[in-house]
Image: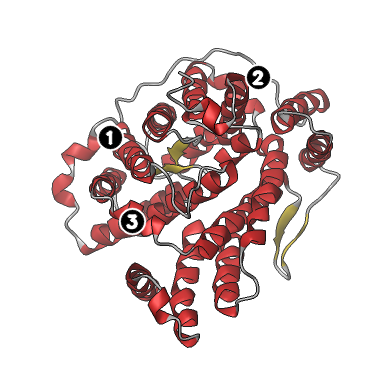
Amino acid sequence: MKNFFQFEERGTTYRKETLAGVTTFLSMAYILVVNPIILSQAGMDKGALFTATALSAIIGSLLIGILANYPVGIAPSMGLNSFFTFSVCIGMGIDWPIALTGVFIAGIIFMILSLLKIREKIINVIPQDLKHAIAGGIGFFVAFIGFKNSGLVIPNPDTFVSIGDLTSRGTALAAVGFVLTLMMLVRGVKGGIFYGMVITTIIGMIVGAVEIPGSIVGKVPSLEPTFGVVFQHLDDIFTPEVLTVIFTFLFVAFFDTAGALIAVASQAGIMKNNELPNAGRALLADSTSGVVGAILGTSTTASFVESSAGVAVGGRTGFTSIIISVCFFIALFFSPILSVITPEVTAPALIIVGALMATEVSNIDWKKLEVVIPAFITIIMMPLTSSVATGIALGFILYPFAMIAQRKAKEVHPIMYVLAILFILYFLLV
């Protein structure tokens, strides 16, 4: 087992990997609650969605751990589930079975692109400075999510955002958890992020900010309402609206996943010579889980940026992903206790992980203006638009223009020019 996952080469142990897997699971576990809530508003069965969410996370995380040896968790993507419900089903009036079939077709296309190594080629030709910008930008984005989930940052009609109510129990709990986690990390406590979440949960239950579950074991809901529905609507996707939906799923999922893999691989020290080792296998695992997820009955899956929480406590190999899968399997039977993993509990971990990831920006060549501006736009637009894909797209558009102006057009890979044109067309037409 140690040889298969390259423990010695990556400087890790069973203890570190297990702790990392549990930490990542706790950071991702909210998806088991949130995904059914969001997708059920499109008319889908909430119980079936819970089971489909857990099973797709189990399968996806197992695949990327075994095939690619990455410490990454895969589950239905936040953002894409909102797009599925509010933009596609409610906004465009497309029935959820047809929209889910669109997700299935997008997943099949993803698998083909992965097998042909087209996705791997695209990721590997991204300039190194932009890769650092993507990793750092995701750090800022993850931290922003943490601040928002904790209530430390709230919407403001005059200034867009402002500081929240520090006297509310949830926000105060998150603030206390953040300080405790920070102190443990600074003191060098191994697994400080994980212990911070556990201590924050206990404090939350004591002060009444976290609800104490009334039971521990719950029945696993049936998949029957959603399982295999996609096979009944394959003839209904050939309309301009549905084809546009498929393209959008392709665009957003492609670069969300690419961004997450680049960020986690950089943080874990897996990146070699500006390339992702086993990138093809990782992308195949990701796309396969998307197809399986659609068959089970959930929107597009993706590699979770929250995986960086596990990397921060020592996760370096696919064994971390195996532990994530095991945790999701256990969660199938213990759904009532998921109520203790509130946004306020996980927020401190996300803020600190965001800070650790943001250190990637120090590797950007800040002396070159043709690099600085595209990199900065990539970084800043991720939290401002709440989209990793949008930040990447805008950076990719600006980079070729900046290099042309600097008379370095030949240093830009042709694929980058193609991507820039496609992104411009995407923003204009879609």
Question: Does any portion of residue 177 appear in the rendered image?
Answer: yes
Q: What element carries label 1?
A: helix
- Measuring from the top left, give residue 250's x and y in whole percent: 33, 55
Mark 1–mark 3 distance (CA, rounded to whole Å)? 28 Å
Quadrant location of the N terminus in the rendered image: top left
Seen at 57% across and 41% down, the residue is: 268
Q: What element carries label 3?
A: helix
Disc 3 marks a residue whose amino acid type is Lys
Please identify, in this view, whether the residue under mark 1 or under mark 2 is nearer the observer.
1
Question: Does any portion of residue 43 appear in the rendered image?
Answer: no
Foreground: 41 or 55? 55
Foreground: 377 or 299? 377
Q: Which mark is residue 121?
A: 3
- Compared across the picture, whether 6 is left or right of 224 comes to right
Query: Label 2: which residue?
Result: 213
Q: Which mark is residue 295?
A: 1
Residue 405 in the image: above or below residue 327: below
Q: Are marks 1 and 3 in contact (CB under 8 Å)?
A: no
Q: Is mark 2 on a helix, strand or loop?
A: loop
- Measuring from the top left, give residue 142's x and y in whole percent: 62, 50
- Compared across the picture, whether 236 is left or right of 253 comes to left
Question: Which comes sooner in the sequence, label 1 or label 3?
Answer: 3
Foreground: 398 or 267? 267
Please identify, in this view, whether the residue under mark 2 or under mark 3 is nearer the observer.
3
Q: Residues within 10 Å of mark 2 (few under 14, many from 20)?
A: few
- Measuring from the top left, give residue 298's x and y in whole percent: 37, 38
- Measuring from the top left, give residue 136's x and y in whole percent: 61, 56
Question: Which comes sooner in the sequence, label 2 or label 3?
Answer: 3
